[in-house]
Image (cartoon, coloured by chain):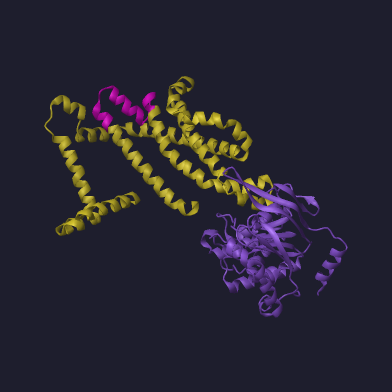
Chain colours: A purple, B yellow
């Protein structure tokens, strides 16, 4: 076990307050006058600097949980605490990369990635901002596309631009909703590698929604397995793989396969009956 | 040219139709699908109409009401050189553009105000809606009483017409902004002002341009209507004056000028549009 993991365990033992805490948080939506329960009352503690993956079939409320942590949705009942304080409005401590990218269509890639640094809350001198934008573009592999508008980028490129835009201001917590869905597998590995090193370096807490079990195992400290309609937590798996992980090789270790198998056993019934495609 | 191109598409489409049924139509089809063939057939058609109009054996009274192309052309010729046409054209274009600019500026300003402050908008919405529904031309006589027969009453009428068009498209533009985009910026820590400056204004621009584009034609129509109702200058006044004097030739000549103006306006707009479209989309 390395230092951060050890420190985390000590902190947990000493009762360090959770970074994010869901307390019987539930969410129902009104659809044609009927209450649809999206998330069943849920308890979940996310520790500081922890990387958490939420996996489960479509429609199990993963995105809803992210929205509640971001303060974009209020729980119907129960509470979401961030640093011990109830989240009651947009939570400016988190960076949220939504499933659908929200790049500004009139801005070029460069200016989209830069936008956070133009805001008073992250005011950055021009020269430094330029340099950081350049590094970010390099990092997500968008060199040569700086002056393209989102309409001129492919789906995968837009995802990467959206990720760069979120990472550039280094929020203490990252919420990511299927960030790598549109990427081919080689590029996905590269992105996973970049994401891992950035979040480890900056000690970010991450809540990561994905369909891809391999992705979840590669990156996470814990994997929250959810079941569908109404969404509820079915199990929480600790990922006991040492850090730092080599995202290109970790997939071929026995520990990885074993973890994958256990997760798959957990999920397969639900995925079969949950996918309403 | 762009419009000629559109017509051409329709032209070839209908010319090909008989070609599909009968085999010997292909010569005609080929003729109409060439540029010269199309222009040529148009000229022939127009010339035919003008010839019938000019030489049709009709009674003197009828000839008085329908005038003739040569008389109309003569009148236009006179107007062109004695300056009549320029004075009236200048007046119409001046009223139209001043009213348009004022209407756009105030419309965009208020549109943003109501778009950015939804509570204000909720208070004012029913009032605005009732004014929006009012055909603005109904205000013309009132404006004449309030502002006089000269340009200011007409400018006011054009401005009011344009104002409502641009106002509603601006409000819609601000309102139709993608919520998720705004939320993303809010989570980044953007202030209200920053959201307005960096998202709302930009997102509303295509809508504003659409409103402004539609408003050009309304401005032209409204100017003419206002000049027909009460004026002492302008193309509308020229039509009204000649009709009032039973000078049909003069009325036709003035209408020809109006037609030329609207064709040029349409051409100008479609050119602007095609230049802007890549940006707007």
Q: Is residue A197 magenta?
A: no
Q: Is residue A206 above or below residue A78?
A: below
A188 or B148, which is in the foreground?
Answer: A188
B249 is within the stretch colored magenta: yes
Task: Name which quarter of the figure residue B82 lies in.
Answer: top left
Image check: B139 left or right of B204?
left
Q: How many marks?
A: 0
- Whether residue A127 is visible to the viewer of this picture, yes or no, is no
Closer-to-camera residue (B66/A79) = A79
Find residue B126 and report its horizontal and vertical position in percent: 55, 30
Which portion, as a residue range, is magenta?
B227-252
Residue B224, image x, y percentages: 38, 31
Q: Quadrant of residue B236?
A: top left
Whether residue A148 is situated above or below residue B267 in the rendered picture: below
Outermost residue, right side: A14
Image location of residue A235, percent across then percent down: 72, 64
Q: Main secondary structure of the magenta part?
A: helix
Residue depicted at x 60% and y 64%: A271
């Amino acid at each position: 076990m390395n230092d951060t993991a050890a420190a985390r365990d000590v902190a947990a033992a000493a009762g360090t307050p959770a970074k994010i805490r869901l307390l019987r948080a539930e969410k129902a939506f009104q659809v044609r006058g009927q209450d649809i329960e999206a998330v069943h009352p849920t308890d979940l503690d996310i520790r500081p600097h922890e990387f958490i993956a939420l996996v489960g079939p479509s429609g199990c409320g993963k995105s809803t949980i992210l929205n509640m942590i971001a303060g974009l949705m209020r729980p119907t009942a129960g509470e979401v605490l961030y640093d011990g304080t109830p989240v009651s409005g947009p939570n400016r401590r988190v960076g949220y990369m939504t499933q659908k990218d929200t790049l500004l269509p009139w801005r070029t890639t460069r200016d989209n990635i830069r936008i956070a640094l133009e805001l008073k809350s992250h005011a950055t001198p021009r020269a430094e901002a330029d340099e950081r934008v350049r590094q970010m573009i390099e990092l997500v592999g968008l060199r040569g596309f700086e002056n393209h508008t989102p309409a001129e980028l492919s789906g995968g490129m837009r995802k990467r631009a959206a990720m760069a835009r979120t990472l550039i201001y280094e929020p203490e917590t990252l919420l990511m909703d299927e960030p790598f869905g549109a990427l081919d597998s080689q590029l996905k590995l590269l992105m996973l590698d970049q994401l891992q090193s950035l979040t480890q370096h900056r000690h970010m807490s991450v809540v990561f929604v994905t369909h891809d079990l391999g992705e979840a195992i590669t990156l996470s400290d814990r994997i929250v397995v959810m079941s569908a309609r109404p969404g509820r937590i079915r199990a929480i798996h600790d990922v006991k793989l040492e850090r730092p992980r080599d995202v290109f090789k970790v997939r071929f270790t026995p520990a990885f396969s074993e973890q994958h198998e256990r997760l798959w056993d957990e999920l397969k019934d639900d995925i079969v009956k949950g996918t309403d495609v | 040219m762009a419009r000629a191109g559109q017509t051409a598409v329709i032209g070839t489409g209908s010319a090909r139709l008989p070609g599909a049924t009968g085999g010997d139509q292909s010569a005609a089809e080929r003729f109409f699908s060439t540029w010269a063939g199309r222009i040529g057939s148009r000229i022939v058609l127009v010339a035919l109409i003008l010839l019938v109009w000019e030489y049709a054996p009709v009674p003197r009274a009828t000839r008085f009401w329908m005038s003739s192309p040569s008389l109309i052309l003569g009148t236009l010729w006179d107007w062109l050189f004695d300056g009549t046409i320029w004075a009236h054209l200048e007046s119409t274009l001046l009223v139209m553009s001043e009213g348009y600019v004022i209407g756009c500026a105030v419309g965009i300003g208020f549109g943003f105000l109501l778009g950015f402050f939804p509570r204000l908008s909720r208070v004012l919405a029913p009032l605005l809606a009732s004014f929006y529904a009012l055909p603005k031309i109904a205000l013309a006589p009132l404006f004449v009483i309030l502002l006089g027969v000269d340009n200011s009453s007409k400018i006011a009428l054009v401005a009011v017409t344009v104002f409502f068009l641009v106002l509603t498209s601006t409000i819609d533009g601000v309102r139709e902004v993608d919520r998720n985009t705004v939320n993303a910026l809010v989570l980044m820590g953007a202030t209200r002002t920053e959201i307005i400056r960096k998202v709302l204004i930009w997102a509303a621009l295509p809508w504003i341009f659409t409103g402004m584009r539609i408003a050009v034609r309304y401005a032209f129509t409204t100017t003419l209507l206002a000049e027909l109702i009460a004026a002492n200058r302008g193309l509308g006044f020229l039509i009204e004056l000649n009709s009032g004097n039973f000078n049909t030739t003069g009325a036709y000549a003035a209408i020809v000028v109006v037609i030329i103006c609207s064709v040029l306006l349409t051409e100008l707009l479609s050119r602007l549009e095609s230049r802007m479209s890549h940006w707007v989309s």
